[in-house]
Image (cartoon, rainbow, N blue to C red):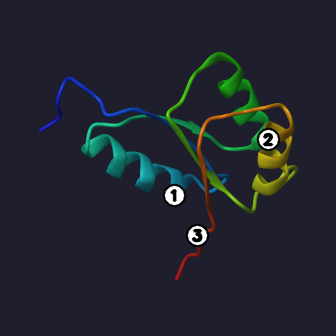
Amino acid sequence: MKQDATFGKILIIDDERENTEIIKDILEDVSYTTMLARSAIEAKEIVASNAFDLILMDVWMPVQDGISLLSEWHSEGFSTPVVMLSLIHI
């Protein structure tokens, strides 16, 4: 049963749809608000107009990888905590 209050707002950045949907479902089941981005470009647009308590970001993405995006944000003084992920399919 979902509650009205949420624990926080989390951005999930991963180009693999299956990964993001699984993480999103788990977090929303325990009362977090989530948003999804499928690329670094999309993540930048979302972050420009939203505040997050945490960002979960894939290390390996096409065009711009997670490490370079994190470095870019760090150089701009970005202060939201970021957890880097590298998920594999078995």
Kindly identify the residue that appears in the image at 66 percent across and 34 percent down.
Answer: 79
Q: Is residue 9 left or right of residue 2?
A: right
**At which x and y percent is residue 18?**
51, 57
* Residue 36 sits in quarter: top right
Kindly identify the residue that appears in the image at 67 percent across and 52 percent down.
Answer: 15
Q: Which residue is mark 1?
A: 18
* Helix, strand or loop status at disc 1: helix
Q: CA distance from mark 3 to mark 2?
A: 23 Å
Q: Which residue is mark 3?
A: 87
Q: CA distance from mark 3 to mark 1?
A: 11 Å
Outermost residue, left side: 1
* Residue 5 sits in quarter: top left
10 Å crowding of disc 2: few (<14), some (14-19), many (20+): few
Q: Which badge, 2 or 1, is on the more N-terminal residue? A: 1
Q: Which one is in front in this view, the residue at disc 3 or the one at disc 2?
A: 2
**What's the mark number on residue 69?**
none
> Which residue is more in the foreground, 88 or 47?
47
Query: As shown in the figure, which amino acid type bears the numbered disc 3?
Result: Leu
Tell me: residue 33, above or below residue 49: below
* Helix, strand or loop status at disc 2: helix
Kindly identify the residue that appears in the image at 52 percent across and 83 percent down.
Answer: 90
Check whether the beta carbons of the residues at disc 2 and disc 1 lie within 8 A of each other: no
Outermost residue, top side: 49
Query: As shown in the figure, which amino acid type bears the numbered disc 2?
Result: His
Q: Quadrant of the N terminus?
A: top left
Q: Is residue 21 left or right of residue 32?
A: right
Kindly identify the residue that appears in the image at 29 percent across and 29 percent down.
Answer: 6
Q: Which residue is mark 2?
A: 74
Q: Which one is in front in this view, the residue at disc 3 or the one at disc 1?
A: 3
* Helix, strand or loop status at disc 3: loop
Query: As shown in the figure, which amino acid type bears the numbered disc 1?
Result: Glu
